[in-house]
Amino acid sequence: MVAPKLVCPRDVDVTVADWADNSTVVHYDGQRPQVSDNSGQVEYRVVGVPDRQRRFPVGSVALTYEAFDAAGNTASCVQYVRVRGPYV
């Protein structure tokens, strides 16, 4: 009974270009976690995404990645998405 190995993507820092838009869209191209397991069968999910369009408000959001295998073993890690307002 060995837990899956899970490595989160790097944290993301984004700056909003205009105060009229108090959130921004963060795309996850290439930012999948590294997941492996001795069983060869492991899945993961992401908890904490604000909405289906992945629009994050100004501030910091923690995304928790949870990996699990067929035996019920689990692992988790956290990635932070920080959205900053424009500097005037």
Image (tube, helix red, strand yellow):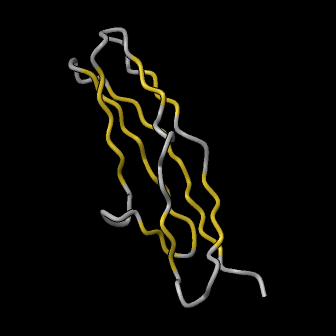
Q: Residue at x 51, y 41 (%)?
A: 31
- Nearer to us in this view, 28 or 41: 28
- Compared with 77, 61 (above or below) is below
| Left or right position of 74 against 34 | left
- Nearer to us in this view, 17 or 44: 17
Quadrant showing the N terminus? top left
Q: Residue at x 55, y 40 (%)?
A: 9
- Compared with 10, 85 (above or below) is below
Q: Residue at x 38, y 57 (%)?
A: 48
- How many numbered badges does the structure rendering display? 0
- Compared with 61, 71 (above or below) is above
| Left or right position of 78 against 53 | right
Image spot of residue 87 (x, y percent): 76, 82
Image spot of residue 45 (x, y percent): 32, 41
Quadrant showing the C terminus? bottom right
Image spot of residue 82 (x, y percent): 60, 63
Say which quarter of the image contains residue 85. bottom right
| Left or right position of 19 against 24 | right
Image spot of residue 30 (x, y percent): 50, 39
